Image (tube, grey):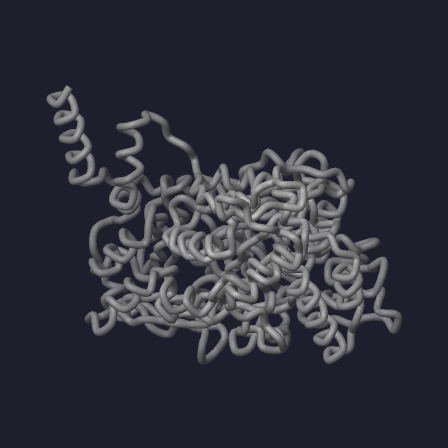
Amino acid sequence: MRRRLAVLWAVLLVGLLAPMPALAQEDGARPAGATLRIGLQQQVDSLNPFLGYTLASTDIFRIIYPTLTTYSPDDFSVMPELADTWESAPDKLTWTFRIRPGVKWSDGQPVTARDAAYTYNRMMTEPAASTANGNFVENFETVTAPDDATLVIRTKTPQATMLAIDAPIVPEHIWSKVPDVATFANDQMPVVGSGPFTLTGYRAEQDVTLTANPDFWRGAPKTAGLQFIQFKNSDAAVQALRKGDVDVVQKLTPAQYEALADQPDITQVKGQGRRFYELILNPGATNVENTPIGTGHPALRDVRVRQAIDRAIDRQVLVDRVLGGYGQVGGGYLPPIFADFHWTPPQPRTFDLAAANRMLDEAGYARGADGIRRTPQGEPLNFDFVLHGDESYDTQVGEYVKRWLADLGINVELQPVSDNQLNDRTTAGDFDMVISGWSANPDPDYVLRLQTCGARPDPDGGGTNDSFLCDQQFDGLYNQQLAEFDAAKRTDLVKQAQARFYDQAAGLILYYQNSLEAYRSDRYTGFTLQPRGEGVITGQQGYWGYYGAQPTEAAMSGSSGTDYTGVAWVLGGVVVLIGVVVALVVVRRRATADTRE
């Protein structure tokens, strides 16, 4: 047995150390010239813009497909994109967008208003087409294109988010030939788009290759192309950055970020993040038909229990010890990077274990002989805490929360699971506590809607629910903000909605993590950061970071490390290979709550 294991390990090591074979051009090889290589530790869940919703996917969609408007790299303010002008009727129900002349798809066909009308109508009429961005068109009554230059959208009720429709527009002459969006992979290269880069290569869970679009209406990019190279973990991505095998790495841990300080030819980037990191407490999961689902503990239906748990979490400790200080204490639902809408609780539930214990005593959850509290019906407060098994942040947060809740007489069982399992259990309401998180947009409507009654799963399990909160007061505030065009009044309504969400304590915002990146400054300069001052390169609301990159002479000459398109996944996947030896099973990862847009 030992001999066979030794031989197997030798085979694995040879596979790890042997040079990778040359890659065929159609199999994901980099475009000739200066190619900006980005290290990913996220999954591209789909190349279909109607279906994909991970951060990695939406980042790529914004490079390929047009949207009516976009967000300024300076301050997230709305600016023209495919539509160069627009106007609304006095009743705020009819909106007319004028399409920018001269914009072409990458196959040479003109981009017209009919493409936008086709895209939105398909989202309105085909359930699968509304998977990723259906909330943008839920309130649309009709979408028409009287001519190639004019798009007319009529809404059922006034909708204040009409300049924040972040749904990719696709070419009608291509997609009208697709009979079923749900089963279309969109992986026939090249993919027809109209952005600064065209998708020309894709290998699942390895890399995505894009080539510069010379006919982009803002002007051709300065780089020959982009290549997103997937790594199993950030350690492998950082190693590749040090060697010069990739040019940009995102999602660095604090230790990795600090280790790159003063490294020659490497520049660090620290910006405010768009994400909130959240602990969901199952408030009694139901679907849109109000049918109870899942296995949530009955004690968590009591808002007093949820508030007591919140009082037992020391957010400052999490920021200091888990994030190494690279983040801000959580409170309101929207991250502080969006200062206009960010809300801070005026009377936060600060960390106080004594107060939390009193709250549970007063609510009638007495301790048993074993020290574990019981419901008034006698059921012990034993909670399952579901975590991402491959996320170090989840593990650390889970250990802290478990210790703190033990002081309340609540027993917590940490359950690190695979990404697939976490997704499935969250959607089914099969949890007591679970880690979640989303990236917010400059307009808060998208993430606010996640907490509405209408976002809960349908009987088939579909939907874009976050916490299973269904609260009529929150829904009323959500609907009011959606219809409010006065900026100050809408901001106030958004903050009232956040206050109600905070009061219900179904989703506890633990912290807002800084975005930590690094890039090879010997190969690229001129990155456009969003927002200006405290911005980042990757994960932007637009394509600015990649479009603005300027290659140096070293990049233009092609002097770089090995061809990492094959090596990256192998080096980053040693743990996976060990798993293959033990289990002889390969499981394809899919989107997780940690990577959702």
Residue 119 percent location from the top left of the image: 69, 50
Up the image or down, 136 lies above or below 536; here it is above
Q: Residue at x 69, y 34 (%)?
A: 460
Q: Position of residue 276 (x, y in %)?
A: 53, 62
The picture places residue 336, in percent across and down from the top left corner, at 54, 73
Height in image: 296 above or below 146?
A: above
Left or right relative to 333: residue 494: right
Q: Is residue 186 left or right of residue 521?
A: right
Residue 543 can be seen in this image: no
Image quadrant holding the C terminus, namely bottom right
Q: Nearer the viewer, residue 337 or 470?
A: 470
Q: Quadrant of residue 26?
A: top left
Residue shown at the point (75%, 63%) measured from the top left: 478
Q: Is residue 163 left or right of residue 437?
A: right
Q: Nearer the viewer, residue 228 or 250?
A: 250
The image shows residue 321 at horizontal and vertical percentages of 36, 65
Residue 538 higher or lower than 52, as above or below: below
Kindly tell me whether residue 132 is visible in this rendering.
yes
At a point 70% along the width and 75% down the height, the residue shown is 491
Q: Given the current orientation, which residue lies at the most extreme left position?
A: 3
How many numbered circles does the render carry?
A: 0
Q: Quadrant of residue 177?
A: top right
